[in-house]
Amino acid sequence: MNLSNIRIGHGFDLHRLVENRKLILGGIEIPHRLGLLGHSDADCLLHALADSILGALALPDIGHHFPDNDPANQDLDSSMIIKKAVSLAKERGYRVGNVDLTIIAQQPKLGSYLPKMRENLSNLLDTPTDSIGLKATTHENIGSLGREEGIATHAVCLLIKG
């Protein structure tokens, strides 16, 4: 494979947990007493993933494409952000080869939700589920994430030309 035909990107996102918000991760609603605070639906998994795609394309982050001071983005479904990132990749001749994501959340336990998230990501990215690495871990009760003040996600993606 010609290495000029592949691009790698990394993304990271973190949102505070608050009362009176739905918890949306990977495009699905997860029952929990707290939800993520943000201008959009605050889906930190999809935000980190979109930033990894945009980073692989050497484009500005999601804040540039979906500014938080634009009323049109209030409570935006973050699936729209992923669709935009994938569209920008396709416009440049790339497709998603694979992604690897790690969610950091003390609570709730996410293991049982990961298969549904992977299926949703597969549809959004137009890539097979076996090309989607998705893990959830805790922060071992250390720091703000360990105190359940927020949830974070790291994402890496590989884009392939053609």
Image (cartoon, grey):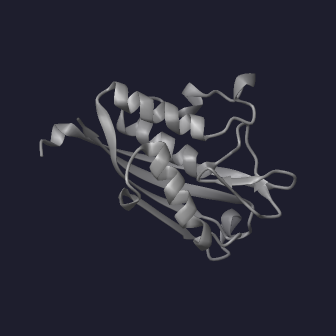
- Nearest the eye: 52 or 128: 128
Q: In the picture shown, does residue 149 fall above or below 109?
A: above
Give the quarter of the image for residue 77. top right
Residue placed furthest toward the right? 20
**Res. 138 visible in picture:** no
Give x and y (percent) for residue 38: 73, 42
Give x and y (percent) for residue 81: 56, 35
Q: In the picture shown, does residue 13 fall above or below 63?
A: below
At x 66%, y 59%, the residue is: 151
At x 32%, y 26%, the residue is: 92
Residue placed furthest toward the left? 1
At x 44%, y 44%, the residue is: 125
Image quadrant where one finds the C terminus: top left
Marks counted in the figure total 0
- Nearest the eye: 5 or 87: 87
**Res. 73 visible in picture:** yes
- Horizontal side of 71 relative to 98 (left or right) equals right
- Horizontal side of 20 relative to 144 (left or right) equals right
Give the quarter of the image for residue 4. top left
- Nearest the eye: 152 or 80: 80
- Horizontal side of 109 relative to 114 (left or right) equals right
Give x and y (percent) for residue 51: 49, 40
Give x and y (percent) for residue 32: 78, 64
Residue placed furthest toward the bottom? 140
At x 43%, y 35%, the residue is: 86
Give the quarter of the image for residue 42. top right
